[in-house]
Amino acid sequence: MNILVVNGSPSGKDSITLQTVRYLEKKFPEQKFSYLDAASRIHALQKDFTPAREALEKADMVLFSYPVYTFIATSQLHTFIRLMKQTDAAVSGKVASQVTTSKHFYDITAHNYIRDNCFDMAMNFVPGLSADMDDLLKEKGQKEAVEWFRHLLWCVENKVFEKPVHHNAHKLIETVNVPESQVEPKNDKDIVILVDSSNTNPTLEAMVRRFQAKLPIKTRVIDLGTFGFKGGCLGCFRCAATGKCIYKDGFDDFLRNNIQKTDSIVMAFNIQDHSMGVRFKLYDDRQFCNGHRTVTTGMPMGYIITGDLDAEENLRMIIEGRGQVGGNYIAGIATNQTDPDGEIDKLALNLEYALDNGLQRTSNFLGIGGMKIFRDLIYLMQGMMKADHKYYKAHGLYDDFPQKQRSTIFKMKLVGLLMNNPKLMAKAGDKVTEGMVGPYRKVVDNA
Ligand SMILES: Cc1cc2nc3c(=O)[nH]c(=O)nc-3n(C[C@H](O)[C@H](O)[C@H](O)COP(=O)(O)O)c2cc1C
């Protein structure tokens, strides 16, 4: 088979992910691999996509190889996917799959993003390999990669492909009423609305205006579409120690002084390729200058979105996951699916409440699970990720290491001894249950 590897890592040939693919090439010499540096050559491909298009059309299988970047694929790969679709590259009926490396932090949403786009292009999709960064260095990881690839070939031979999920599409509403501002906006707070003029539409713009008219708080609109980004995150990790990005386009300062110091951020975007569009993705990736520091914790957020969000299960998970991990209460997501006017009004009302009452998000699995991955990662990499390590220590983010909870471990040992002894258990009787629920009852009694 002619396998075209679309390398979505900005590190190009030095990509860690690519080493897994090269390993597979050696292990399966009967397959013909060719490589396309999609991310590191993205500026050239934006000018002329022909070489990529020709390579895609020659291939039997397209294998996306990329690192997970902030919940999805890199912004450069987002651009590549956009170009594939815009140029109508004839990939329909070809096999598609993917290999990623990451720390497994939201690798699931990255994989879903590529999968959903492959479905759009009518490709025959086989689930990919999501490896940890270090897996290839271990025998187990090598074996898993080989087994995955063998199965991938088997799936192709037997036409075992994943089936797309179909949703009943909403007929999107385009008319949004923009009233005059009813009250003089309060000046004591500052809300930033992020927009992207390179991917917008009149409905989205009207939704933003209605939101501004309904929210009795001063707002500032920042257009990511016209910000002079020099490029997408290069994954060079130079910012890890100092927090300073190697690009000299001033984005890190702009982010810290003009966006993150605000009271709330509202993101207004048009769904594009199952994501929030290239520019918002670039903005997200470039926030890596903040490393894994949850610097906007406690700040409520909101979303204004055009597009069929109900059909975008993955994007909804990304939005919730981002709020969860960032420690941000999501005050609402207004869309134009059924009642844009009403949804915007509720978002404005709830955001005001959240700000007035310091409403915090309560944690669920998406946040707790995500933060545990970060905690372990930063602790291990403390020597390199100095800024993160300092922040994690200062904010007590290492305090939930289980090995620190000695008294709980000791108590549980006693409980284990008791439970393993039928005589003691018989004697204890109801006291065991009472011992467990008692502390909670005490809180209720004292309330
Ligand atoms: C900007 C940026 C964002 C990242 N986001 C994630 C992430 O969301 N989840 C994760 O598990 N790892 C994340 N990582 C780690 C990379 O996925 C990991 O280092 C990967 O192995 C790099 O592969 P590459 O050398 O092929 O580019 C991120 C790294 C960078 C530089």
Image (tube, rainbow, N blue to C red):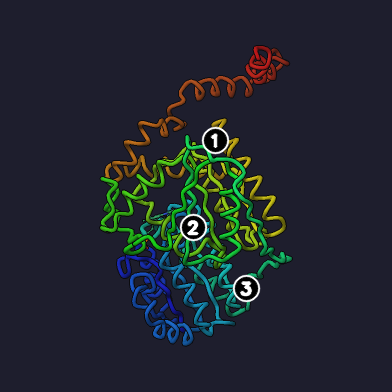
Answer with left or right where residue 256 lies relative to residue 405: left
Find residue 247 and report its image quarter: bottom left
Q: Is residue 204 placed above or below 2 in the rendered structure?
A: above
Circle on res. 355: 1
Describe the element under mark 2 as helix, strand or loop: strand
Circle on res. 195: 2
- Considering depth in this image, is 423 or 131 the residue closer to the camera? 131
Is disc 2's CB within 8 Å of ligand 1? no
Query: In the rendered structure, are the residues bearing label 3 and label 1 in contact, judged by CB atoms less than 8 Å apart?
Result: no
Query: Which amino acid type is shown beneath numbered disc 2?
Result: Val
Q: Earlier in the sequence, mark 3 or mark 1?
A: 3
Q: Is residue 77 placed above or below 122 in the rendered structure?
A: above
Query: Which amino acid type is shown beneath numbered disc 1?
Result: Leu
Residue lying at 57% horizontally and 75% vertically, measured from the top left: 154
Percent from the top left, x then y, of residue 102?
A: 43, 56
Percent from the top left, x then y, of residue 430?
A: 73, 16
Percent from the top left, x then y, of residue 129?
A: 49, 64
Query: In the rendered structure, are the residues bearing label 3 and label 2 in contact, judged by CB atoms less than 8 Å apart?
Result: no
Circle on res. 161: 3
